[in-house]
Image: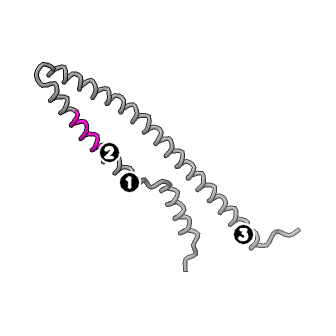
């Protein structure tokens, strides 16, 4: 038997190389997706804990201030504290909306690697 022709062998190697590149890029894409999922889960966990403790702090601070001014200005203090909390809530809502509009470049490494692959595989004239 003779060895396969040079063109057929080159096509097989090119196909193998392209499949290896595709497999590597898919693995990179999968890793990026998993990292993003873990990052979001961790942010949600720590955000929930922080929110709970800040809520407890605000509640206890409010009770402390109201009890401190109980005899003279209790209604004024309650109104003032409610106004401060309302303004803080509005500012947090504005910050949340701003953060929701800003999107991260998910799969940025995979896109960059695919762009490099295209540049390398495109024939230059």
* Among the two numbered marks 3 and 1 on one chain, the one whose residue lies closer to the N terminus: 3
Horizontally, is 11 left or right of 52 in the view? right
The range drawn in magenta is 82-93
Q: Earlier in the sequence, mark 1 or mark 2?
A: 2
Cα gap from disc 2 to disc 3, whole angstroms: 58 Å
Q: Residue at x 62, y 59 (%)?
A: 22
**Residue 121 sits inside the magenta stretch:** no
Q: Position of residue 122 (x, y in %)?
A: 57, 72
SS at circle 3: helix
Point out which mark residue 11 bears: 3
Residue in view at x 34 percent, y 28 percent: 53
Badge 2 or badge 3: first in the primary sequence: 3
* Pointer 1 residue: 102
Query: Mark 1 and mark 2: span between their CA atoms?
Result: 14 Å
Whether residue 89 is in magenta: the answer is yes
**Residue bearing the label numbered 2:** 93
């Amino acid at each position: 038997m003779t060895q396969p022709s040079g063109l057929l062998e080159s096509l097989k190697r090119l196909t193998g190389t392209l499949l290896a590149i595709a497999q590597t890029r898919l693995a990179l894409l999968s890793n990026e997706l998993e990292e993003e999922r873990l990052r979001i889960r961790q942010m949600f966990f720590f955000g929930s804990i922080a929110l709970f403790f800040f809520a407890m702090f605000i509640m206890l601070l409010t009770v402390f201030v109201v009890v401190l001014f109980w005899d003279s200005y209790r209604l004024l203090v309650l109104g003032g504290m409610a106004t401060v909390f309302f303004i803080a809530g509005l500012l947090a809502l504005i910050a949340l909306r701003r953060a929701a509009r800003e999107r991260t470049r998910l799969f940025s490494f995979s896109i960059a690697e695919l762009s490099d692959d295209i540049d390398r595989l495109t024939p230059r004239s």
